[in-house]
């Protein structure tokens, strides 16, 4: 958390802060309004479910936060193992450093562990491949 003193409506950052606690004017020792803000470096992302049926917007600062918020928004079980890929080409996003380089509003897909990304339609599993294999 950071303590920010503002007077006259001044801003201390380019980020949109989320208010976590505000002290009343009566509790301040000065004429300044003291507001305690928790600053986030969250960026907007678009997430899509594994069947490409539901698309949601989510704000996240870290890859773990994106996964947790994404599971909740897509109604995935909280204990379900998932991984994140770029929807456009299936590139797996499994490192925080790479995640931080992604631009705002990147479309990401949350796949179940065992799923394989497909450019069209829902993902498939290796079991699907074996079931559809032609026996000679």
Image: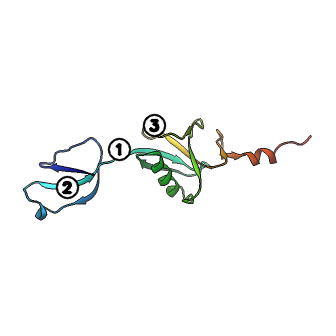
Q: Are marks 2 and 3 in contact (CB under 8 Å)?
A: no
Q: How many marks?
A: 3
Nearer to us of marks 1 and 3 is: 3
Quick check: 1 left or right of 87? left
Quick check: 13 left or right of 113? left
Nearer to us of marks 2 and 3 is: 3
- Going 41% across and 45% down the picture, which residue do you hit? 44
- Few, some or many C-alpha atoms within 10 Å of disc 2 (few <14, some 14-19, many ≥20)? some
Q: How far is mark 2 from mark 1, CA to CA?
A: 19 Å
- Going 45% across and 44% down the picture, which residue do you hit? 45
* Nearest the eye: 110 or 82: 82
SS at mark 1 in the image:
loop
Q: Position of residue 109 (x, y in %)?
A: 56, 45
Residue 136: name its quadrant.
top right
- Few, some or many C-alpha atoms within 10 Å of disc 1 (few <14, some 14-19, many ≥20)? few
- Few, some or many C-alpha atoms within 10 Å of disc 3 (few <14, some 14-19, many ≥20)? few
Q: How far is mark 2 from mark 3, CA to CA?
A: 32 Å
Q: Are marks 2 and 1 in contact (CB under 8 Å)?
A: no
Label 2 vs 3, first from the N-terminus = 2
Q: Position of residue 95 (x, y in %)?
A: 50, 39
Residue 119: name its quadrant.
top right
SS at mark 2 in the image:
strand
- Please tell me the numbered disc located at residue 41: 1
Residue found at the far right of this picture:
136
Q: How far is mark 1 from mark 3, CA to CA?
A: 14 Å
Quick check: 68 left or right of 120? left
The residue indicated by pointer 3 is 97
Label 2 vs 1, first from the N-terminus = 2
How is this picture coloured?
rainbow
The residue indicated by pointer 2 is 35
Residue 102: name its quadrant.
top left
């Amino acid at each position: 958390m950071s303590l920010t003193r503002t007077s006259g409506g001044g801003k201390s950052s380019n980020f949109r802060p989320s208010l976590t606690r505000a002290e009343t004017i009566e509790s301040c020792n000065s004429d300044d309004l003291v507001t305690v803000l928790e600053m986030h470096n969250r960026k907007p992302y678009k997430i899509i479910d594994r069947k490409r049926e539901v698309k949601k917007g989510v704000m996240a600062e870290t890859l773990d936060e994106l996964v947790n918020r994404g599971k909740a928004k897509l109604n995935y079980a909280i204990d379900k193992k998932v991984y994140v890929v770029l929807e456009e080409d299936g590139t797996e996003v499994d490192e925080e450093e790479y995640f931080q380089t992604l631009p705002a509003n990147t479309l990401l897909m949350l796949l179940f562990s065992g799923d394989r990304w497909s450019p069209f339609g829902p993902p498939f599993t290796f079991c699907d491949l074996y079931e559809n294999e032609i026996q000679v």
